[in-house]
């Protein structure tokens, strides 16, 4: 009997073995990111290390037989914030969200909705494009659930920008709906969302 996720010999999601996608960063990537933060190397030099690290992560996933392949989220500062702050109207502040990660010097910044939420440029599309170019298997790109912006954003600025919360949800739904500027758009597969803000919400993950 064909294994789950296979039809006619071709691998199709959902797969029997899968993973979220966040992988531990290799030491050389951690060092390069630290040097970039100090201004010791430029963005191009950091990207070269990211590319090499991502290729290594892809080779590892493929070598163990995984069919859905991620970039390990190696280019992100924060798994959830990077995508959301790619929208117009969303900014980050050095002010802490109030959740402290033990054993880490860096803490997540606070997202603030300072203007009407719009998508005028692609958000992280180049990350996904590179991933697709270096694997022949299903490229998987995990996106944060849109509700993360509401659950982990600054409420005073949100309420000041959107006195009508219904307008906020309408705009957020619009910018996070599939279109040519979303990472998985233009492919034969359907994008989805990962990591909802509460344990009561579903946790689907996206494949390209």
Image (cartoon, helix red, strand yellow):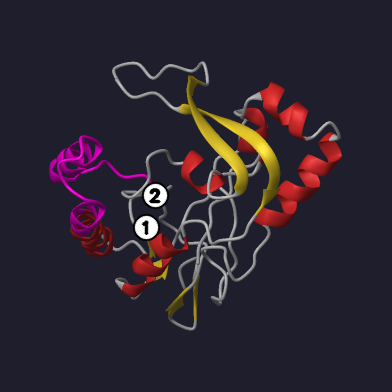
Compared across the picture, whether 88 is left or right of 64 comes to right
Residue 80 shows up from this direction: no
Give coordinates of residue 77: x percent, y percent.
37, 40
- The boundaries of the magenta stretch are 21-49
Q: Pointer 2: residues within 10 angstroms few (<14), some, or many (20+)?
A: some
Residue at numbered disc 1: 70
Labelled pair 2, 1 in contact (Cβ < 8 Å): yes
Quadrant hosting residue 114: top right
Give coordinates of residue 87: x percent, y percent.
59, 50
Magenta stretch, overall SS: helix
Residue located farthest toward the bottom when viewing the structure as drawn: 8
Along the viewing direction, whichever of 112 and 59 lies nearer the viewer: 112
Q: Is residue 65 magenta?
A: no
Distance between mark 2 and mark 1 Cα atoms: 6 Å
Compared across the picture, whether 52 is left or right of 70 comes to left
Compared across the picture, whether 82 is left or right of 137 comes to right
Quadrant hosting residue 185: bottom right
Give coordinates of residue 86: x percent, y percent.
53, 49
Residue at numbered disc 2: 21
Along the viewing direction, whichever of 39 and 159 lies nearer the viewer: 39
The secondary structure type at the circle numbered 2 is: loop
């Amino acid at each position: 009997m064909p294994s789950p996720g296979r039809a006619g010999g071709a691998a199709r999601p959902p797969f029997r073995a899968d993973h979220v996608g966040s992988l531990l960063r290799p030491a050389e990537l951690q060092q390069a990111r630290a040097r970039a933060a100090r201004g010791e190397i430029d963005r191009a030099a950091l990207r070269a290390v990211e590319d090499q690290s991502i290729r290594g992560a892809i080779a590892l996933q493929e070598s163990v037989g995984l069919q859905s392949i991620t970039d390990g989220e190696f280019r992100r500062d924060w798994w959830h914030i990077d995508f959301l702050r790619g929208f117009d109207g969303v900014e980050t502040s050095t002010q802490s969200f109030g959740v402290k990660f033990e054993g880490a010097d860096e803490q997540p910044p606070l997202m603030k909705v300072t203007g009407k939420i719009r998508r005028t440029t692609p958000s992280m599309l180049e990350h996904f494009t590179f991933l697709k170019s270096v694997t022949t298997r299903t490229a998987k790109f995990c996106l944060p659930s849109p509700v993360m912006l509401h659950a982990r954003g600054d409420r005073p600025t949100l309420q000041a920008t959107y006195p009508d919360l219904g307008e906020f949800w309408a705009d957020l739904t619009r910018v996070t709906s599939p279109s040519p500027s979303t990472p998985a758009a233009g492919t034969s597969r359907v994008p989805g969302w990962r990591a909802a803000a509460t344990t009561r919400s579903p946790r689907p993950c996206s494949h390209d």
